[in-house]
Amino acid sequence: MQITETVNQDLRREYKIVIPANDLDKRLSGRIEEMKPRMNLKGFRPGKAPAAHLKKTFGKQMMGEIVEQAVNESSQQAVKDNNLKPAFPPRVDLDSEIEKVMDGKSDLEFTVKVDLMPDFALADVSKLKVEKLVSDVTQTEIDEAVMKLAEQTRGYSDRAEGEAAQKDDQIAIDFTGSVDGEEFAGGKAEGFNLVLGSGQFIPGFEDQLIGAKVGDKRDVKVKFPADYPEAKLADKDAVFAVTVHAVKKADPIEVNDDLAKKVGFDNLSTLNDRVKTQLKADFANASRLHLKRRILDALDAEHTFPLPPTMVEGEFDAIWRAVQAELEREGKKPEDEADSEEELKKEYHDIAERRVRLGLVLARLGEQNGITIAPDEINRAIATRARQFPGQEQQVFQFYQSNPQALAEIRAPIFEDKVVDFIAELAQVTEKPVDRETLFMDPDEAAEKLGDKPVEKPEKKAKKAKKSEE
């Protein structure tokens, strides 16, 4: 066997490997001699079939196994002899005509390509300086949340016979939508309860039902927005045939102990306490989201090193497929998002590089600091996912138990969060008070509003990719 290095560039190595035909033939002969005593062929006594006959009968099939084994062993030998740390299993390209190799008429020649893990120094996370956006829960916000709960649970009473529907009334309707005279999927319902002015339907629909009475039949004419998620309906004129079955006015809102009992609490004080606790949790989650983003930005800024090409291209391909699927759903082209498809690809390629770089940094930090994922953490995450599919929980658990790649996708965000929390404990974190509106903004938008140093803008576009990944 001859191994020759042909490429030595950054994180890529390539080796030309030649295994002579007579070497393969010796392996085949050895395999036949090994199996001969166990062979029982018609016309021969057990174990007495001639090697030449066995070679003629089974040689080609056995040679396939020998070639596969030789390729695997020599590829691993090249990695071991050169002290390589592969980012992926070596890739093999055959240079010989496989049929000639199988017939023993040609040497086995192939190229082994290896992407290496980068060797880089980790930044001292205790020196990272990041801000944590924070906001206090006020009594006004508690009162607003309780009032919203009261509005969501309020009752409705029938209006007097012949009385017309007004804004904020609830009406029960049947409707059938059509575009160019043809009904479309999802445009039909019976006994649908709609609060006029709630904005639940597309603009113009609810306004045209103000003044309607029980028994009325109306043709509601609307135009779907240009950015409507269903591309086939976007910017289209539509007509909804509507029949009104009931008109009800909202009952007065009363924030008192009766409201608390209605939603499962002993009294209003207990309800206020529970709402306050929930709001604090929501604020804390939003604050953590901003902190995580700023920690990742700081880590990205502190680390610059070559990245495994195959790893980057694999990440980019996954992102780009998701982006294309989302654009197709929206009826858009890449040129609608950027000056050209090449420019858009460049932006998403930058995102792929960022994700790979941060993934490697977080993995190294986790490894060096003994951060692990316990089985019960994985199980809780799977249980959360399973609850999204009522009645199919067992199938969801079985899917993850039998699918290592899917299990890795569950594990990855848990590991990332644990490493980020570890960094947050060591980094120099300063709190920055903001209002509630800013706290619940997208991290990019919040940074712009606060005049902070711009963060990675392509990451904002990556939401299109993230939608398909979820």
Image (cartoon, rainbow, N blue to C red):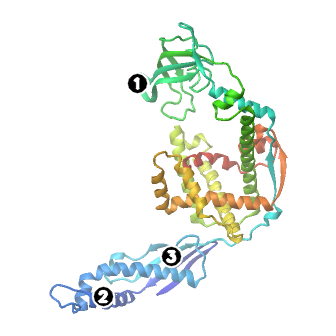
Asked if one can make out residue 411 in the rendered structure from this viewpoint, the answer is no
Indicate whether 325 appears above or below 192: below
Instruction: Read off the residue under disc 2.
Output: 35
Label 3 or label 1, whichever comes before in sequence order: 3
Q: Rounded to the nearest whole Å, what is the CA distance between mark 3 and mark 1?
A: 59 Å
Label 1 or label 2, whichever comes before in sequence order: 2
Splitting the image into 4 quarters, where does residue 212 fall? top right
Label 3 or label 2, whichever comes before in sequence order: 2
Label 1: few (<14), some (14–19) or many (≥20) C-alpha neighbours in 10 Å: few
Residue 295 vs residue 192, the one in the foreground: 192
The amino acid on which the numbered mark 2 sits, given as a three-letter code, is: Met
Splitting the image into 4 quarters, where does residue 254 fall? top right
The residue furthest top is: 162
Marks 3/1 in contact by CB < 8 Å: the verdict is no
Q: Mark 3 or 1, which is nearer the eye?
A: 1
Instruction: Read off the residue under disc 3.
Output: 112
The kind of secondary structure element at disc 2 is: helix
The residue furthest left is: 43
Q: Mark 3 or 2, which is nearer the eye?
A: 2
The kind of secondary structure element at disc 3 is: strand
Marks 1/2 in contact by CB < 8 Å: the verdict is no
> Horizontal placement of 125 versus 353: left or right?
right
Q: Mark 1 or 2, which is nearer the eye?
A: 2
Residue for point 84% across, 49% down: 431
The kind of secondary structure element at disc 1 is: strand
Return the x and y of residue 410 as percentages of the image width and height: 57, 57
Indicate whether 307 appears above or below 3: above
Q: Please tell me the numbered disc located at residue 182.
A: 1
